[in-house]
Image (cartoon, rainbow, N blue to C red):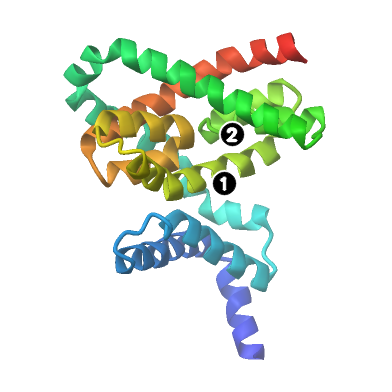
Amino acid sequence: MGDLRDIWVYLSASPLLHLTLTLVAFQIGNWIYQKGNKNALLNPVMIAVVVTVAILSVTGTSYQEYFEGAQFVHFILGPATVALAIPLYRQFNKVRKSAFAIVVSILTGSLTAMISALAIGILLKSSDDTLISLAPKSVTAPVAMGISEQLGGLPSLTAVLVMLTGITGAMLGPILLNMLGIKDWAARGLAMGTASHGIGTARVYQESEVAGAFSGLAMGLNALATAILLPLIWQLVF
């Protein structure tokens, strides 16, 4: 055990350790997902999070220490998000023809996400800072954290809620859409992108490039709509 502890101390000093841990955890999650016939409930991101948290807890590694080594993954989230413009460009004609439906869908979805979150928080008698941290949960993390901070919320709590929303949406969204009989790829993409941002977009892109393009568009427009509408709703209601 002493030798193993010495090895861990040596490895933990390497900035690549936690990057490697993140990638291996995701590969484990993806392997389980593939072996489970791509069952939506076996979301690879969820499994990777569980594996990573378990290892960090056992080794007593703080999040700050982990992030120092894994921040490259955080860095490439930006280019990965911008890369969603490629399938969107390929589906530009379909997007142009559905412009009105897209705008109505995004506004409806954005308002529903915010109002339902606030309503649940009020029913549970949450404090104001918790309410505002909860409201932007369906928006991609950087935007959601910025909105939360500006309105007096807790950005760290918002980040956790955003992640949980994305994972839950990626797991249950396709099942719910199938139960509702929604087969149109554009509609499925808009729903997933609006409700569960990047993680949902990654999930639906595995099903169809059309769905992935519309989901990426919905993710961006929902972030814009929430950034504009949530402060107005907060001032009017609270």
N-term-proximal mark, 2 vs 1:
2
Q: Is residue 71 left or right of residue 35?
A: right
Q: On the rendered image, what quadrant is the N terminus found in?
A: bottom right
Residue picked out by circle 1:
164
Pick whichever, 40 or 129, lies toward us. 40
Describe residue 151's horizontal placement relative to residue 38 as left or right.
right
| Callout 2 amino acid | Lys
Whether label 2 touches label 1, CB < 8 Å = yes
User: Quick check: 122 left or right of 162?
Assistant: right
User: Mark 1: few, some, or many residues within 10 Å (few <14, many ≥20)?
Assistant: some
Q: Quadrant of the C terminus?
A: top right
Category of crowding for the residue at label 2, using alpha-carbon neighbours closer than 10 angstroms: few (below 14), some (14–19), many (at least 20): many
Residue 158: x %, y % from top left: 65, 37
Q: Residue 92 lies in what quarter of the image?
A: top left
Cα distance between the residues tagged 2 and 1: 9 Å
Determine the image quadrant of residue 23.
bottom left
Give the secondary structure at mark 1: helix
Viewer-proximal residue, 155 or 98? 98
Residue placed most toward the observer, 45 or 149: 45
Q: Which residue is mark 2?
A: 137
Residue 224: give x, y in percent of width and height.
49, 18
Residue type beneath disc 1: Leu
Task: Please state the total of marks drawn on the protein image.
Answer: 2
* Residue at the image point whose x is 41% and y is 63% from the top: 29
> Is residue 232 visible in the rendered structure shown here?
yes
